[in-house]
Image: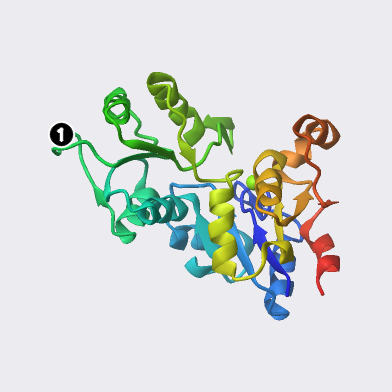
């Protein structure tokens, strides 16, 4: 059995534009009963919203069960540590709900003791006050978790700062390295592999980003396929391969080329 862990932005769609042959590839997997899971570093949306967004743009059938986010992974990782349930969060609704669903207790500033964890993701209402609270807790001993390291997110005008950029302020102030959850961290890959229920060597990690998708997939022992869309459409792949010292097992122009990997 072969399975696929597939990136979304830059791989299935670019902003609100569907990418060529991406929907056709998923429909092929569906017809042939080949397991797949969409793995996204985006921590702001709930899995249901991610699936709706994907369905609206690409017209493929998708449900929350087909999606695995960095927020779900962060929540599960914290719960798995058994080092307490109290969490101070900087993030949006997707992260908040994932933490609550995992049985964790979200605390507000001034809610008594130091929390066990500080977790940060993208927060478009990030403020100095939130930064100050997070930094104070980490310096007092809370463990720092970062949903995903992305510095920049593509938007219609160019780029906006991602979770990694907000986390940069926390790292600098505390001089503390966070546990990073999203790609290229093997943490999100390992949980996604477990959810898929196949050995890593039988899973292809597919994405447009060498630094996150391909490095993360390779670190988790999966096979990797870089698609020349999204980030990879504009970057010099040979130079990036050389710089990162990591080479995808396959490089393709669009997802339908991957059907040749099917058993
Ligand atoms: Mg991508």
Q: Position of residue 118 (x, y in %)?
A: 33, 38
Q: Is residue 185 left or right of residue 147?
A: right
Q: Is residue 194 left or right of residue 206?
A: left
State whether residue 219 is above or below residue 29. above
Q: Quadrant of residue 30?
A: bottom right
Q: Residue at x 57, y 44 (%)?
A: 185
Circle 1 is placed at which residue position?
110
Q: Residue furthest front?
A: 82
Q: 237 and 73: which one is in front?
A: 73
Dot 1 alpha-carbon crowd within 10 angstroms: few under 14, some 14 to 19, many 20 or more: few
Q: Position of residue 1 (x, y in %)?
A: 73, 75
Q: Is residue 200 left or right of residue 252?
A: left
Q: Residue at x 59, y 54 (%)?
A: 189
Q: Position of residue 61 (x, y in %)?
A: 58, 71
Q: Position of residue 71 (x, y in %)?
A: 44, 51
Q: Residue at x 53, y 62 (%)?
A: 67
On the question of residue 53 being in view, the answer is no
| Secondary element at tag 1 | loop
Q: Is residue 248 left or right of residue 88?
A: right
Q: Residue at x 61, y 43 (%)?
A: 184
State whether residue 21 is above or below residue 63. above
């Amino acid at each position: 059995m072969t399975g696929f862990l597939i990136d979304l932005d830059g791989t299935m769609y670019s902003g609100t534009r569907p990418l060529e042959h991406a929907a056709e590839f998923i429909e092929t997997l569906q017809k042939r009963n080949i397991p797949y899971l969409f793995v996204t570093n985006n921590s702001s949306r709930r899995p249901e919203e991610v699936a709706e967004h994907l369905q609206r743009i690409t017209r493929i059938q998708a449900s929350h069960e087909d999606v695995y986010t960095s927020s779900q992974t962060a929540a599960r990782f914290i719960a798995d540590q058994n080092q307490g349930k109290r969490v101070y969060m900087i993030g949006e609704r997707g992260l908040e709900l994932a933490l609550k669903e995992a049985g964790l207790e979200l605390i507000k500033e001034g809610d008594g003791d130091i929390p066990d964890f500080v977790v940060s993701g993208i927060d478009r209402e990030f403020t100095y006050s939130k930064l100050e609270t997070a930094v104070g807790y980490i310096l007092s001993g809370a463990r720092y978790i970062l949903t995903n390291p992305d510095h920049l997110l593509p938007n219609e005008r160019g780029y906006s700062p991602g979770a990694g950029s907000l986390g940069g302020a926390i790292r600098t102030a505390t001089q503390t390295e966070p546990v990073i959850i999203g790609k290229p961290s093997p943490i999100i890959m390992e949980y996604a592999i477990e959810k898929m229920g196949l050995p890593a060597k039988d899973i292809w990690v597919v994405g447009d980003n060498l630094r996150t998708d391909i490095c993360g997939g390779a670190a988790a022992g999966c096979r990797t396929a870089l698609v020349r869309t999204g980030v990879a459409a504009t970057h010099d792949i040979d130079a990036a391969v050389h710089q990162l010292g990591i080479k995808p097992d396959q490089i393709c122009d669009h997802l339908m080329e991957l059907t040749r990997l099917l058993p």
